[in-house]
Image: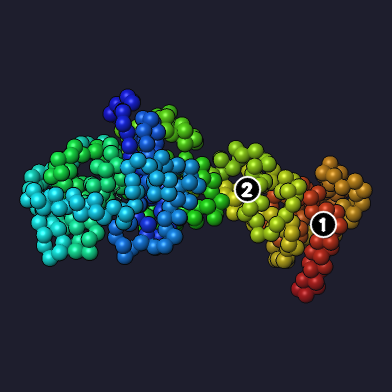
Amino acid sequence: MRKTGKSIKGVRTRVAPSPTGFAHVGTAYVALFNYAFAKKHGGQFILRLEDSDVKRNVPGAEEAIYKGLSWLGLSWDEGPDIGGSYGPYRESEKLEIYQGQAKKLVGEGKAYEDNGAIRFKNPGEEVSWNDLIRGVITFPGEEITDFVIMKSDGYPTYNFAVVVDDIEMKISHVIRGEEHISNTPRQLAIYKALGVVSPQFAHLPTLRNFERKKLSKRRDPVDLRIYQKEGYLPEALVNFLCLLGWSHPEEKEVFSLNEFVTSFDLGRVRKAGPIFDVKKLDWINGVYIRNLDDNTLSDLVGKYLSVSVSEDFLRQVVPLIKERISKLSEAENLLSFFWERPSLQPELFSPHGVSHVASAARALGEISDWILEDVNNKLGELIAEKKFKTGEFYMSLRLALTGKRVTPPINESIVILGQDEVIHRLEEAEKVLVEVGARV
Ligand code: GLU
């Protein structure tokens, strides 16, 4: 492993998404690693919008990027929304700057006009850099031909704008996706032509799905809003992203963003494309959910339910499901029976189902003090007296009261449902089971 523990001065990193749609999880990943590197070295992390490919810009996309990164707690020190000393931070607002630099290159004979566009004259020299993740990468001079830097519409191309921007913004380290490795030789040639020392480069591995294919808009859940909607906690998603291609020096799997910053080291980033394993994300999210205190979790769960329920109710039910959910959206399915009478599926009941629900209705009707202890005792006595099989008996109660086989702890749920409602549902189940029984 390379040793990069020493603090580096003047670190400025950036993430430079194009506002072409929603906030992509890959943008969050790149932002996270840039954020960590900058913060680790006491530097700045900058957000810049590469909006010079005008046809691809989508209204609202900027906002989505701000929202997505803010949700994850990846705050930027300079950006289009908050400004900074090295702006503008939108490419579309600095066309004269690109034009000026391009003209300068033309004047020096390093670029030339071609049908209204400006083309960079490639010197054809071998280009090489020491990638902080991949080591030395070299491209032979013949591979780079002359290329357009300013289009005839007055807009710069990506390879030119990115260099001008990184120079203007005093970016010290360019940390970005590996798909840009092949762009780097052109960019280095421009740095040289402009007489500027280039930043250092580090190319992160491309995130892959289970088929080892690059995550794609069409195939994979890449929009950050999907994760928000499903009830992933931002801290958990960040923790998961940290583990993609990077490992904690003590092999820890669960750690905070601050801890990531402290232990971050580009030398620990692997080259191979990490698999975006949603099962692992679910596991991490479950850990974060269980680490929340009950009141915080209640407030969050409340936001994910389809009905509005009282705070008091949430405080009662949330401890019952805390161990059983891995994302907040799963609460609805476990809790909906509280406000929605179940539709019964008689075929799921055992042959003793009728007798279970009928005797439970009677026994529970006898309770005068509707508390957990009395419900436990009463049902325990009933099971012993009738020689029911405990598991089978409780499955009948689950099915009758909730319509489902998997539920929160049933006696606790019985107490919360209330005596009248429980007896009503048991009697309904009895009726349905008797009817079905008479038909066969
Ligand atoms: N807009 C480019 C991207 O999102 C930025 C590339 C770069 O960081 O140089 O991939």
Q: Quadrant of residue 149?
A: bottom left
Residue 402 in sight from this viewpoint = no
The picture places residue 76, in percent across and down from the top left corner, at: 42, 42
Q: Dot 2 surroundings within 10 Å: few (below 14), some, or many (20 or more)?
A: some
Mark 1 vs ligand 1: CB below 8 Å: no
In the picture shown, does residue 89 fall above or below 423? above
Give the number of the disc on residue 315: none
The picture places residue 3, in percent across and down from the top left corner, at: 29, 26
The picture places residue 331, in percent across and down from the top left corner, at: 64, 52
Query: Of the residues shown, which amino acid type is indicated by label 2?
Result: Leu
In the picture shown, does residue 418 fall above or below 291? below
**Residue at 19% from the left image edge and 58% from the top image edge:** 150
Tell me the element at label 2. Answer: helix
Q: Quadrant of residue 192?
A: top left
Quarter of the C terminus within the rendering: bottom right
The residue lying toward the viewer, choosing from 291 and 395, is 291
Quarter of the N terminus within the rendering: top left
Mark 2–mark 1 Cα distance, whole angstroms, equals: 28 Å
**Residue at 32% from the left image edge and 24% from the top image edge:** 6
Disc number lying in front (2 or 1): 2
**Residue at 51% from the left image edge and 45% from the top image edge:** 234
Comes first in the chain, label 2 or label 1:
2
> What residue is pinned by disc 2?
300
**Residue at 24% from the left image edge and 42% from the top image edge:** 167
Q: Quadrant of residue 166?
A: top left
The color scheme shown is: rainbow
Left or right relative to 2: residue 61? right
The residue lying toward the viewer, choosing from 68 and 372, is 68
The residue lying toward the viewer, choosing from 367 and 84, is 84
Query: Of the residues shown, which amino acid type is indicated by label 1?
Result: Val
> What residue is pinned by disc 1?
422
Asked if marks 2 and 1 touch (Cβ < 8 Å), the reply is no
